[in-house]
Image (tube, rainbow, N blue to C red):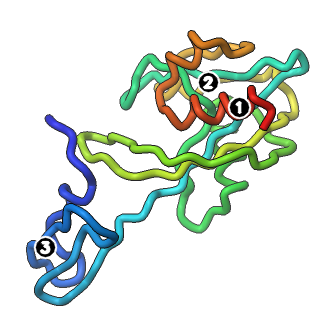
Amino acid sequence: MDSTSIEKACRFCPRCGKEAEVEEQGRVPFRCTQCGFANFFGPVAAVGGLVTNEQGELLLVRRAREPEKGKWGLPGGFVDRNESIEEALSREVLEETNLCVSEASYLTSFPNLYDYAGAVSPVIDLFYLCQVVDQAVIQLADGELDSFLWVKPTQKHLSEMAFPSNRRAIEKWLSGA
């Protein structure tokens, strides 16, 4: 199955059900010619935690499923409805690694494209520097992650990242910016 943008995958108006025209360029990629409804297909929010240990090493986790199975990333995931960014960060780090975030400070954000089952959606990834309660209790989410490393990231690690946004966040952290 070939991947397609979420705008092209959603061809019918959610208000009236008529097949909609997709604008290839411009701010409004979905506009219904029947009722005038417009969908901006704005980015979905996601979080990533840059968790470090006492030696200044960064926690990387390896993806056990698509997209980008077998590549490295940062603990994180999508923000749920009615959840703050901070709540999502704590929940995702806990779900994926069993680590409890005790402190988090905003680092940066980068746009990302997420290919899920052939539909590519825009995402805005927000990255935080994280302190955790006890680094010795790491237990990876079964079926989601299959390995972890504490590393001082090198170019080799950066080249094996699942998502460019994760790589860029690590590069920003390494630069001290």
Give the CA distance from mark 1 to mark 2. 7 Å
- The local secondary structure at tag 3 comes to loop
To which residue does mark 2 refer?
140
Q: Quadrant of residue 24?
A: bottom left
Measuring 47% from the left and 26% from the top, which residue is drawn there? Answer: 162
From what the image shows, is residue 133 above or below residue 55?
Answer: below
- Residue, x 53% and y 49% (percent of image)? 78
Categorize mark 2 by other alpha carbons within 10 Å: few (<14), some (14-19), many (20+). many
Q: Are marks 1 and 2 in contact (CB under 8 Å)?
A: yes
Q: Earlier in the sequence, mark 3 or mark 2?
A: 3
Categorize mark 1 by other alpha carbons within 10 Å: few (<14), some (14-19), many (20+). some
Label 1: element kind: loop
Q: Identify whether 126 is placed above or below 154.
A: below
Question: Residue at horizontal 26%, vertical 67%?
Answer: 29
Of the two numbered discs 1 and 2 on the same chain, state the one appearing first in sequence: 1
**Amino acid type, label 3:** Ala
Q: Which residue is mark 1?
A: 98
Q: Amino acid at mark 2?
A: Leu
Judged from this view, the residue extending furthest toward the right is: 54
Residue 150, given in percent of the width and then of the height, sits at 73, 15
Q: Position of residue 42 (x, y in %)?
A: 42, 64
Q: Is residue 145 above or below residue 12?
A: above
Tell whether 91 sits left or right of 12. Answer: right
Residue annotated with mark 3: 20
Q: Please tell me whether mark 3 or mark 2 is closer to you in this view.
A: 3
Q: How many numbered circles are shown?
A: 3
Q: Nearer the viewer, residue 84 or 155?
A: 155
Q: Secondary structure at mark 2?
A: loop
Whole-angstrom CA distance, mark 3 to mark 1, is 44 Å
